[in-house]
Structure formats: structure tokens, C-alpha cells
Image (tube, rainbow, N blue to C red):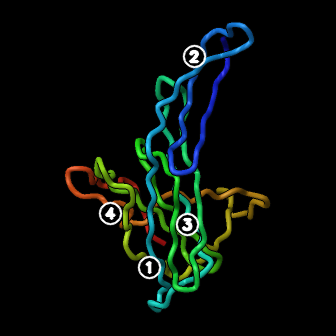
Amino acid sequence: ARGRLLVQAPGFGEAKKRDLPAISDGVMHVDFALVRALSVHGRVLGADRVPLSGVLATAVASDVGYEGWRGDWRHARTDADGRFRIDDLSRDLPHALMLTKHGHGTRVYDFPPPGLDAAEIDLGTFDLGAAALLAGVVRDTSGQNIAGASVDLRGTNSDRARLLDAPYAEPISGGCSI
């Protein structure tokens, strides 16, 4: 049969099937091997080393394999003590943690690979500095302002790979910090 089937259960990562079996007597039998999920937790501090509440902590992952695209997008907000916890992550996907709060810089950190039996990873403490402002004027070659021009800034924080141990850590090419 054509189509895809996605299964989610608390405490487990998502499972997906792409090639579905034929329907027999009005019933389709599909077996899934659900894998226990991974949980992560950590803490976020401001530039003054004071806990930041209300930071959006998002775990993101993306992979394309035989079963098609798979991904995770789970999030939590930090509490008054700057702590967050994100549950039900697929342990077989490479995740990154994105931390963002209005008025503060955005940071991204790659997760370390989980141990075979690890149910939870303590990601540690993160410093979320103040936001920076990028301002300027776009002009053409004759010096005239260009109204409505779009500016795209790309890069990542220079310590994005700080949670990774060698041999997993790879230098980030073209990265920048603002």
C-alpha cells in the first residue's frame, strides 16, 4: 500500500514506516520497534551569570534515510532558575540545541552522541549573552540607497561544538559570533 505511517508514544522516539503492507480483510498489520527516547536537561544564565527564565530551548534534528525524512522538533521554556528539560527525543538522530530569548543572543550547540544505555543527558550550563544589533544601509554602485533590500546574515556561535568530544568534534567553517 502507498503512504506513510508515523507512531508516537510517550517515553519513546518517533517511528515511521514508508512501505506499508497490503490491506487484508479490511486490516493492515504493521509492526514497529519503538526505541526508548532520550531526555536532555540544562541551565541557561544571562551575561551577568543570573538564571534566565523564559528562554526557548529547542532540540532539533533532521535526517533522510530509507524511510524518508525523519526529524525531531521539541522544545521547553526555562523556569525561574534557568533550568529546562526536553523529553521524547529520538536517540538515533543527531540533535542540536537552540537557545533563544528576545533581547538576548541566540546560540546553537550540537548534542554529544548518547551512550548506548543513557536515558538522559545533562547538557550543562549555557551563557546566553545580550543580543547585538547589526545596522547599515544597502547602496548600489553609484552610492544610492536601495529601498526594500534584503540582508541575510549566516553563521553560528564559535563554541557550537563545545559539547562534543573528539573524535566527533569538527571545526565549524565560516562560523561567526555577533
Q: Is residue 140 above or below residue 92?
A: below
Could you tell which of marks 4 and 1 lies nearer the N-terminus? 1
Q: Are marks 4 and 1 in contact (CB under 8 Å)?
A: no
For this view, does 116 lie left or right of residue 94?
left
Q: Which mark is residue 127?
A: 1
The quadrant in which residue 7 appears is top right
Residue under the image location 44 percent in, 72 percent down: 42
Residue under the image location 47 percent in, 62 percent down: 108
Would you name the residue on which mark 2 appears?
A: 19
Pair 2/1: label in front: 2
Would you name the residue on which mark 4 appears?
A: 163
Q: Is residue 178 above or below residue 9?
A: below
Could you tell which of marks 3 and 1 lies nearer the N-terminus? 3
**Element type where label 3 sits in the image:** strand
Q: Are marks 2 and 4 in contact (CB under 8 Å)?
A: no
Q: Amino acid type of disc 4?
A: Leu
Instruction: Find residue 105 and report its horizontal and vertical position in percent.
Output: 54, 74
Q: Tag 1: Cα neighbours inside 10 Å, few (<14), some, or many (≥20)? A: some
Q: Amino acid type of disc 3?
A: Ala
Q: How many marks?
A: 4
Would you name the residue on which mark 3 appears?
A: 57
Instruction: Find residue 133 and report its horizontal and vertical position in percent.
Output: 60, 77
Could you tell which of marks 3 and 2 lies nearer the N-terminus? 2
Gap between marks 4 and 3, in whole Å? 16 Å
Pair 3/1: label in front: 3
Could you tell which of marks 2 and 1 lies nearer the N-terminus? 2
Instruction: Find residue 116 and report its horizontal and vertical position in percent.
Output: 29, 47
Instruction: Find residue 178 and report its horizontal and vertical position in percent.
Output: 49, 72
Q: Are marks 4 and 3 in contact (CB under 8 Å)?
A: no
Gap between marks 3 and 1, in whole Å? 13 Å
